[in-house]
Amino acid sequence: MVNLIWLGMIVLSFIAAAATGRMDELTKAAFDGAQTGVTVCFGLISLLVFWMGLMRIGEDAGLLKKLADLLGPAVRRLFPDVPRDHPAIGYIMSNMSANLLGLGNAATPMGIKAMQELQKLNPDPKTATPAMCTLLAINTSSITLVPTTLIAIRMSFGSANPAEIVGTTIAATAIATGAALLADRWYRSRASRPPHRSDPPAGLPRPARMARSRRPAEAALTPASGESGRPPRAESG
């Protein structure tokens, strides 16, 4: 679907440029965009390689394991239906650790592996489990302490202070994560509630009404007080 949307936008832009006689401007914009994309990619590659190298050093030094241990209680609380020793827990903690450092490209493979492991626990492969929905919410709105990718983009475009967005990024991602977790807890609580008893279909009496409607008939068949209900015996002379 996304490919069709992009194809439609490209075709419509060519049609509009041809109809208005601005094909030269369209061609120039296409080449300028390609050049800007390559420039931004080179800036991102340099910074991402730097941070990935630092992450590897931290992993070898045990820093990521310490961070995963700190996240462990929170992860187990957020995913109570996943066994503690399941491989999905490790991938989830790695995904969250990478997102905290703003390394979305490194977090994506861990998130995919976590989803694959959670799918193994799924009794219905065609329906997402609550744990999968929670992981998607956290991965989409994860708290970011160091927005590495945004800093690299700002550096590529010559920002005077590329790191000035750190504080606002932490605040924005914290609010987004809180909202995502609240929505996730709310939907989980709704799914765990027992279903409400539905009213009987229209035209059918309620059980109470049925009981009341039977009482007059039962009273007519019940003998009055003091009567045994047996036929009278003939008196002997």
Image (cartoon, rainbow, N blue to C red):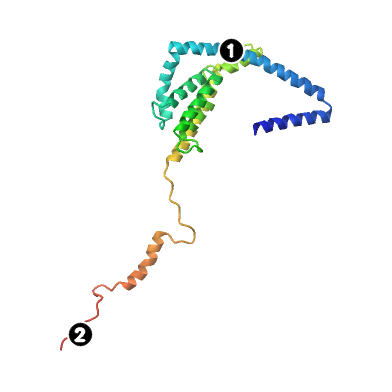
| Residue 191 drawn above or below residue 36 | below
Q: Decide which of 62, 160 is in the foreground and name it.
A: 62
- Residue 196 shows which numbered tag? none
Give the quadrant of the N terminus. top right
Q: Position of residue 162 (x, y in %)?
A: 60, 13
**Residue depicted at 57% across the width and 12% down the height:** 49
User: Mark 2 or 1, which is nearer the eye?
Assistant: 1
User: Is the residue under label 1 in contact with that under label 2 (CB below 8 Å)?
Assistant: no
**Residue depicted at 68% across the width and 32% down the height:** 5
| Residue 37 drawn above or below residue 201 | above
| Residue 1 drawn above or below residue 28 | below
| Residue 37 drawn above or below residue 133 | above
- Residue 234 shows which numbered tag? 2
Q: Say what amino acid the circle numbered 1 marks.
A: Leu
- Residue 202 seen in render: yes
- Residue 182 seen in render: no
Q: How many other residues sit within 10 Å of disc 1, few (<14), some (14-19) or many (≥20)? A: some
Give the quadrant of the C terminus. bottom left
Real-space Cα separation, disc 2 to disc 1, in angstroms: 115 Å
Q: Say what amino acid the circle numbered 2 marks.
A: Ala
Circle 1 sits on which residue?
Answer: 47
Q: Position of residue 83 (x, y in %)?
A: 39, 29
Q: Decide which of 39, 151 is in the foreground and name it.
A: 39
Q: Position of residue 75 (x, y in %)?
A: 43, 26
